[in-house]
C-alpha cells in the first residue's frame, strides 16, 4: 500500500473509533438523563470536533458519508405511505400538517426578519426549517409511552409525517431562492422541473415492472443477506439517478420508499434498512455537532437562548390554536403543542442547503443550529411540565366526577372498567344483570361515557367506597384491575367486610394466583392464561396436528398446571413440581391405540 493511501486509511480508522466511542459514551449518558439519543450525538460531535477538543478536524468530509443517513430515513418515510394509512389520516396529514408547517414557518420567518434583521430570503430559509419538529426525538417517545395509537398520538404522527414529506419541497424552495453563481453544468430551472417529473414517473414504472419482481425473486431464494443488499441497492440506485440529474437524492430515496409501500416485503425491508439508517443518521448528527461554531455561539448566548425560547413559544402557540380548530380537547391540544415545539433534525439539512445557496452565512447557520439543539434539549422538560399539568387536571377533574354513592342498587360491582372489566361487565349486562361500574382513571371514565357507559369514579378497593356503592347488598364483587396486582391482604379485608358477596379477582400472574390461593374466593383468573392456551392450540393446528390430539395436549397441560399450582401453594416454593412441565426432554407421550 502506498504511504498516502496507508495514512488515509489510518486516519479514517482513527476518526471512526473516536466518533463511535464518543457517540457510545454520550448517547448512553443522555439516554440515562432522559434527553434522547439525538442530543447525545450532537454533544459528542461538539466535544470531539474542531471547536471542541479538536480530535477531528474535517467534519465536512464525514458529512458527505453521513448524508446517506438522511437518504435512508426518507426511504423509510416513503415506506410508511401505504394508501390505506394515507386515506385514513388524510385530513390530519394534509390539513393539520400543511397548516402547521406553513403558519409556523411564516411566523418564525417574520420573527427572524423583524427581530434579528435578516433579509426576507434569509428569514424564509431559516423560518421554514425551524417549523419542522424532531421525528427522531418525538416518535420514540410516543412509542415508548404507548401514545402512538391514541387519537392525540396519531395527530402528532400525522404532523410529523407531513413535515417529513415537506423536506423535498422545502429544499426546492431554498434552491429557487439561491444567490449563488449558476453552475454551468447544471440544467436551467424549467429543465430541472421536467427532469423531476420524468424521474418520478420513471422510478414508479421501474418499481412496478422491475423492483417488485426483483424482490419476489430474492424472496424465493430466502437469503437474508441478499435481501439487505437488494434493499440498499434500490435506495442508492434511486438516489444516484437523482444525483445524475442534478436533483435531490433525498427525493429519489423517498420515491423508492413510496414505490414499495404496498409491497409484501415492506416490513422486511424496514427491518433490514433501519440499522444502517440509525448508524448513518447518528454520524450525521455527530458531523453537525462538529460543525457548530462555539465561538460564534459564545459571542451571542442571549440571542441563542432568546431565539430558542421564541421558537418553542411560537410553535406551541400555533399548534395549540390549530389543534383547537381541529376540535381537539384543550389538554390534548396543549400536549400536542408542547410535544412538537422543538426544532428538528431536518433543520440541519436545510440550513446546509441554505448555506450552499448563499442565503445565510456559516456563522448564522451555527447560531441557528445551536437554537435547534437547545430547543430539542427542552423537550423532555416540557413533557414533564405537561405530565404535571395532566396530574393537576386529573385531580381537579376527579373532584367533579360522580362517585358511586349516587349509583342505583345493583347485583354486581365491577371494579376496574379497562379492557378486562369491559368484557366481564358486558357479558353480565347481556343477561340483564344490574352492574355498578367503578374506575379510578378519569380518562377511562370519559372514554366509557362517550360509548354510553356510566362509570363511577373512585378507588374500588376501599371498603368505605364499596359500602357507598352498595357492597353490603351486592351478590358479587369482581376486581378487574389493569396494571399492578391487588395485595391479598387487601382482598382479605374486603371478604370480611362483605361476606355475602361472591368475590372474583383477576390475578396478575402465577405468583399473584399463588398468593390469592389461601383466600375463600369464588373465582380467580390469570389474565393471560386462556389467551395463551388458545394461541398454543392454534399453533399446534397450524403444524398439522389433528383437533383430537390438540384437545388431548390442552387437557394434559391444564391438569399438570393445576397440580403444579396446588403443589406451589402448599409448599410456597415456585419451583415445586417443575419436573411436570413440558420441555424439550419431556414431551407428551403418544396416544395409546
Image (cartoon, helix red, strand yellow):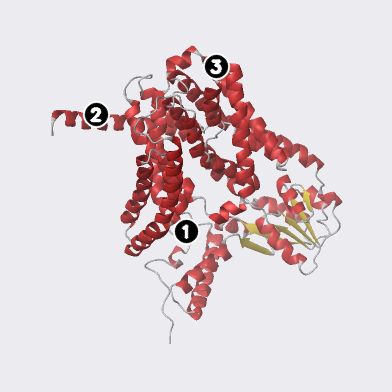
Identify the image quadrant of residue 306: top right
Secondary element at tag 2: helix
- Marks 2 and 3: which is nearer the front? 3
Q: Residue at x 61, y 44 (%)?
A: 94
Quadrant where the image shows the C terminus: bottom left
Mark 2 is surrounded, within 10 Å at the Cα level, by few (under 14), some (14 to 19) or many (20 or more) other residues, namely few
Q: CA distance from mark 2 to mark 3?
A: 37 Å
- Marks 1 and 2: which is nearer the front? 2
Left or right, 70 with respect to 509, comes to: left
Mark nearer the N terminus (2 vs 3): 2
Q: Which mark is residue 303?
A: 3
Query: Closer to the camera, 32 or 367?
Result: 367
Secondary element at tag 1: loop
Picture coordinates of residue 138 (x, y %)? 54, 38
- Marks 3 and 1: which is nearer the front? 3
Q: Residue at x 38, y 38 (%)?
A: 246
Left or right, 469 with respect to 534, comes to: right
Mark nearer the N terminus (1 vs 2): 2
Mark 1 is surrounded, within 10 Å at the Cα level, by few (under 14), some (14 to 19) or many (20 or more) other residues, namely few
From what the image shows, is residue 147 above or below residue 366? below
Left or right, 154 with respect to 357, comes to: right
Q: Which mark is residue 575?
A: 1
Picture coordinates of residue 154 (x, y %)? 61, 46
Residue farthest top in this picture: 299
Q: Is residue 153 visible?
A: no
Quadrant where the image shows the N terminus: top left
Picture coordinates of residue 354 (x, y %)? 46, 27
Q: Is residue 120 visible?
A: yes
Q: Which residue is mark 2?
A: 11
Amino acid at each position: 500500500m502506498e504511504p498516502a493511501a496507508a495514512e488515509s486509511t489510518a486516519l479514517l480508522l482513527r476518526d471512526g473509533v473516536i466518533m463511535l466511542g464518543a457517540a457510545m459514551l454520550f448517547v448512553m449518558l443522555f439516554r440515562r438523563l432522559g434527553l434522547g439519543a439525538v442530543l447525545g450525538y450532537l454533544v459528542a460531535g461538539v466535544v470531539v470536533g474542531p471547536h471542541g477538543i479538536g480530535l477531528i478536524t474535517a467534519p465536512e468530509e464525514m458529512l458527505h458519508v453521513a448524508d446517506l443517513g438522511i437518504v435512508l430515513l426518507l426511504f423509510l418515510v416513503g415506506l410508511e405511505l401505504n394508501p390505506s394509512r394515507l386515506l385514513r389520516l388524510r385530513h390530519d396529514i394534509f390539513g393539520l400538517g400543511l397548516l402547521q408547517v406553513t403558519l409556523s414557518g411564516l411566523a418564525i420567518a417574520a420573527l427572524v426578519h423583524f427581530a434579528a434583521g435578516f433579509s426576507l430570503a434569509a428569514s424564509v430559509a431559516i423560518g421554514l426549517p425551524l417549523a419542522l419538529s424532531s421525528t427522531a426525538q418525538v416518535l420514540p417517545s410516543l412509542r415508548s409511552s404507548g401514545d402512538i395509537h391514541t387519537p392525540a398520538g396519531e395527530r402528532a404522527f400525522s404532523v410529523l409525517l407531513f413535515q417529513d414529506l415537506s423536506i423535498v419541497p422545502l429544499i426546492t424552495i431554498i434552491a429557487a431562492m439561491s444567490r449563488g453563481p449558476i453552475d454551468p453544468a447544471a440544467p436551467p430551472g424549467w429543465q430541472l422541473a421536467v427532469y423531476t417529473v420524468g424521474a418520478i414517473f420513471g422510478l414508479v414504472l421501474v418499481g412496478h415492472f422491475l423492483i417488485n419482481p426483483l424482490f419476489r425473486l430474492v424472496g424465493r431464494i430466502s437469503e437474508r443477506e441478499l435481501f439487505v443488499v437488494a434493499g440498499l441497492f434500490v435506495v442508492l440506485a434511486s438516489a444516484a439517478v437523482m444525483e445524475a440529474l442534478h436533483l435531490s437524492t433525498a427525493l429519489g430515496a423517498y420515491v423508492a420508499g413510496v414505490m414499495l409501500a404496498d409491497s409484501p416485503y415492506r416490513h422486511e425491508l424496514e427491518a433490514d434498512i433501519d440499522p444502517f439508517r440509525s448508524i448513518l443518521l447518528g454520524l450525521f448528527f455527530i458531523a453537525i455537532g462538529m460543525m457548530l461554531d462555539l465561538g460564534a455561539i459564545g459571542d451571542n448566548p442571549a440571542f441563542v437562548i432568546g431565539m430558542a425560547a421564541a421558537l418553542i413559544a411560537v410553535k406551541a402557540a400555533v399548534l395549540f390554536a390549530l389543534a383547537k380548530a381541529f376540535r381537539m380537547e384543550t389538554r390534548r391540544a396543549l400536549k400536542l403543542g408542547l410535544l412538537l415545539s422543538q426544532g428538528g433534525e431536518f433543520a440541519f439539512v436545510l440550513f446546509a442547503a441554505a448555506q450552499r445557496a448563499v442565503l445565510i452565512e456559516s456563522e448564522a447557520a451555527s447560531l441557528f443550529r445551536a437554537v435547534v439543539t437547545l430547543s430539542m434539549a427542552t423537550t423532555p422538560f416540557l413533557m414533564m411540565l405537561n405530565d404535571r399539568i395532566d396530574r393537576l387536571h386529573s385531580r381537579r377533574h376527579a373532584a367533579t366526577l360522580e362517585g358511586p354513592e349516587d349509583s342505583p342498587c345493583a347485583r354486581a360491582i365491577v371494579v376496574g372498567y379497562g379492557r378486562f372489566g369491559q368484557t366481564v361487565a358486558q357479558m353480565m349486562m347481556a343477561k340483564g344483570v344490574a352492574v355498578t361500574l367503578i374506575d379510578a382513571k378519569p380518562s377511562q371514565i370519559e372514554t366509557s361515557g362517550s360509548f354510553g357507559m356510566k362509570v363511577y369514579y373512585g378507588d374500588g378497593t376501599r371498603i368505605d367506597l364499596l359500602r357507598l356503592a352498595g357492597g353490603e347488598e351486592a351478590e358479587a364483587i369482581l376486581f378487574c384491575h389493569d396494571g399492578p396486582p391487588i395485595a391479598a391482604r387487601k382482598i382479605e379485608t374486603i371478604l370480611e367486610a362483605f361476606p355475602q358477596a361472591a368475590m372474583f379477582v383477576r390475578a396478575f400472574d402465577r405468583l399473584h394466583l399463588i398468593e390469592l390461593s389461601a383466600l375463600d374466593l369464588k373465582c380467580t383468573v390469570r389474565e393471560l392464561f386462556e389467551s395463551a392456551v388458545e394461541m398454543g392450540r392454534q399453533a399446534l393446528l397450524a403444524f398439522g396436528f389433528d383437533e383430537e390430539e390438540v384437545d388431548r395436549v390442552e387437557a394434559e397441560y391444564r391438569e399438570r398446571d393445576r397440580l403444579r399450582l396446588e403443589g406451589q401453594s402448599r409448599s410456597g416454593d415456585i419451583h415445586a413440581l417443575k419436573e411436570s412441565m413440558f420441555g424439550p426432554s419431556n414431551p407428551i407421550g403418544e396416544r395409546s391405540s
